[in-house]
Each structure stands twice: as C-alpha cells, then as structure tokens.
Amino acid sequence: MENKTTVQEFNRFLNIHKQLYLQTLELLKDVPDEVFKSTPIDNEVMYLGTRVNTINIGGLIRHFVLAEIHWFQAMKEGENGLAIPKPDNASLLENIADGQELVEKYKDVFAKGFEILKSYTEEDLNKTVSFMGRKYTVMAFLWITFGHHSYHLGQVDMLMRQNGIYPAEYMEWPNTSTLIG
C-alpha cells in the first residue's frame, strides 16, 4: 500500500512547526544570558548520560538550529534516496554569543528554514531519504525533526527549572486564534 503524503498533511506540519518555534521563543525570552551556559545537575537521580551532562541551553539551541536548517535544505536539494549527512554548518553560528544574541540569530535561521520548507513540492515530500541507517519519506522525516526539537526543548525546560526559572507551559501555544491541525 502506497502511503503518499498530501499537501494537507504538510500544511498541518508547517502550522505546528511554526507554533513550536513561537513556543521556543516564549520559553527563551526571559532566560538571562549566563544561564545559557549552565549545565545539568549531575547526581544519581538526574543522571541523563555522559553526553547530555555536558550540554547546556546554548549548546542545545545551537544543535537544533544547525540541524534543522541543514536537514530542510538537504532534503529540498537532494535526490530521491538521499542519505542525509550529519550537519557540518557550525560556521553559521560562529561568533554568535550564547544568550539573547543566539535567540536573535535563531529567528533569522528559522525564517530561512521556513522559506525552504514553503518551497517543498508534493514530489519533494514523497522522496525517500535515509538518516542514521533508517529510511523515511521527507514528510516522515519532517515529523522526526519536530520530535527532535521537542525533545531538546524538554531538556532546556529542565535546565531552566534547575536555575530557578519557571518556563512557559508546553503546548500552551502563544497563538490562540489559529486552528492547529
């Protein structure tokens, strides 16, 4: 059975993707610059693994900003069957300080990524790609990017709470007038 992506599903993704972006900005707006460099509490209860315990809010934001623009561009430009390479675009955020300067750069990069997404055709959405040994349609991988962003946003939330900052509630999307879905 063919599982063809529809424009309706893609438009739903674009709508929810933009709401997640607005949620991210809402979450980060009151975080002092110095908190972007704080690391997780490291104890038996909060142990999250060796790699995660070395990351901070700035690193998490850099990670998903660079990954998303890379993935969106690679899938648009790539041929059917593309093996998406790991991002190699760190220069995009070179000389950008952690903190609100990074948030401002995120706004620019998100806008560019959103323009790339809006240029996708139905043919683009139905291409197959592979990443880390798994195969997806482009549309399916776009949903993976949403999950990836949400996963790291949860880590940002935890780091904020550990620093005494009460974050915005997740899924209380800032835009209440738009029907989501």
Image (cartoon, grey):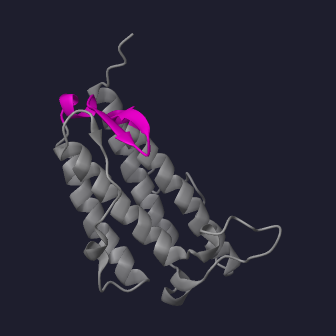
Front-lying residue, 18 or 2: 2
Q: Residue at x 45, y 43 (%)?
A: 144
Left or right: 120 as drawn, with respect to 43: left
Residue 62 point in image, percent of width and height: 41, 71
Residue 45 point in image, percent of width and height: 82, 67
Looking at the rendering, the stretch of residues picked out in magenta corresponds to 121-140
Q: Is residue 180 visible?
A: no
- Give the number of callouts: 0
Q: Is residue 164 visible?
A: yes
Q: Is residue 137 magenta?
A: yes
Q: Quadrant of residue 66?
A: bottom left
The N terminus: image quadrant:
top left
Front-lying residue, 63 or 88: 88
Does 16 appear above or below 135?
below
Residue 6 point in image, percent of width and height: 30, 24
Q: Residue at x 30, y 61 (%)?
A: 110
Q: Residue at x 36, y 52 (%)?
A: 18
The C terminus: image quadrant:
top left
Front-lying residue, 91 or 175: 91
Residue 24 point in image, percent of width and height: 46, 63
Left or right: 63 as drawn, with respect to 121: right
Does 78 appear above or below 66?
above
Q: Quadrant of residue 91?
A: bottom left
